[in-house]
Image (cartoon, rainbow, N blue to C red):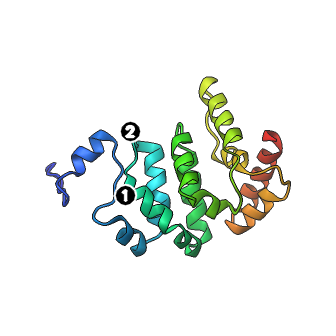
């Protein structure tokens, strides 16, 4: 509140935040069924704020309910995915997302994690500013139409579609 009082319905929210634990309030599957965007947000928050081992119950719920992501508006998916990829070092979260099957649900193809890891490593080592579209392009397979199909499915703007395709060519 304005006076600095923290309202924590779980009694552990402050401790979780300080420890970098990303958890659902209550039952993870119930929270995901209420809004499947929470599946993507779990991984985004993990990329930005997570520390240590991820919450096993949350990851299991995300994996079990990954099909629900397909029912989300394309713009909501692309917005969350690009925010996740804008984290300083999203490699752990992206690998976790891939392991849960959520990334493949979005991309509709296995991700090229080796190329993605290499790109983030280069950006980190050379202190480049990260570019989420370039990172997204790095995740795509060598199929030259993959960027166009993904841009159409996620309803990216023409500028973002063109950027994704240009980035895709630069990382192959």
Describe residue 63's horizontal placement relative to residue 73 as left or right: left
Identified at 71% across, 39% down, the residue is 115
Residue 125 x, y percent position in the rendering: 61, 24
Residue 93 x, y percent position in the rendering: 51, 46
Describe residue 125's horizontal placement relative to residue 63 as left or right: right
- Compared to residue 126, the image places residue 144 above or below, namely below
Q: Quadrant of the C terminus?
A: top right
Residue 86 x, y percent position in the rendering: 56, 45
Q: Residue 172: give its label.
A: none
Identified at 53% across, 66% down, the residue is 66
For the residues bearing labels 2 and 1, Cβ distance under 8 angstroms: no
Check disc 1 and report its element: helix, strand or loop: helix
Give 68 or 126, whichever is nearer the viewer.
68
Local packing at callout 1 (Cα closer than 10 Å; few below 14, some 14-19, many 20+) is some
**Real-space CA distance between mark 2 and mark 1, rounded to the nearest whole angstrom:** 15 Å
Image-quadrant location for residue 35: bottom left
Give 115 or 131, whichever is nearer the viewer.
115
Image-quadrant location for residue 31: bottom left
Check disc 2 and report its element: helix, strand or loop: loop
Q: Which residue lies furthest to the right in this view?
A: 144
Identified at 75% across, 58% down, the residue is 161
Give 62 or 16, whichever is nearer the viewer.
62
Count of marks overlaid on the render? 2
Identified at 46% across, 62% down, the residue is 62
What residue does disc 1 label?
A: 57
Which mark sits nearer the N-terminus, 2 or 1? 2
Q: Quadrant of the N terminus?
A: bottom left
Q: Residue 52: give its label.
A: 2
Residue 96 x, y percent position in the rendering: 52, 49
Describe residue 52's horizontal placement relative to residue 16 as left or right: right
Local packing at callout 2 (Cα closer than 10 Å; few below 14, some 14-19, many 20+) is few
Q: Nearer the viewer, mark 2 or mark 1?
A: 1
């Amino acid at each position: 509140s304005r006076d600095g009082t923290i309202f924590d319905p779980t009694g552990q929210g402050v401790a979780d935040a300080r420890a970098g634990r990303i958890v659902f309030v209550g039952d993870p599957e119930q929270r995901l069924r209420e809004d499947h965007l929470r599946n993507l947000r779990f991984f985004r928050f993990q990329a930005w704020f997570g520390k240590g081992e991820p919450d096993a119950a949350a990851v299991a719920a995300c994996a079990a309910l990954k099909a629900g992501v397909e029912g989300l508006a394309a713009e909501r998916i692309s917005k969350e995915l690009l925010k996740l990829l804008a984290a300083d070092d999203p490699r752990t979260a992206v690998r976790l997302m891939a392991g849960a099957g959520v990334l493949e649900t979005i991309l509709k193809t296995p991700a090229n994690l080796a190329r993605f890891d290499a790109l983030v490593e280069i950006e980190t080592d050379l202190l480049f500013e990260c570019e989420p579209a370039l990172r997204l392009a790095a995740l795509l397979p060598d199929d030259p139409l993959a960027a166009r199909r993904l841009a159409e499915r996620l309803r990216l703007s023409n500028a973002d579609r063109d950027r994704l395709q240009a980035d895709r060519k630069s990382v192959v």
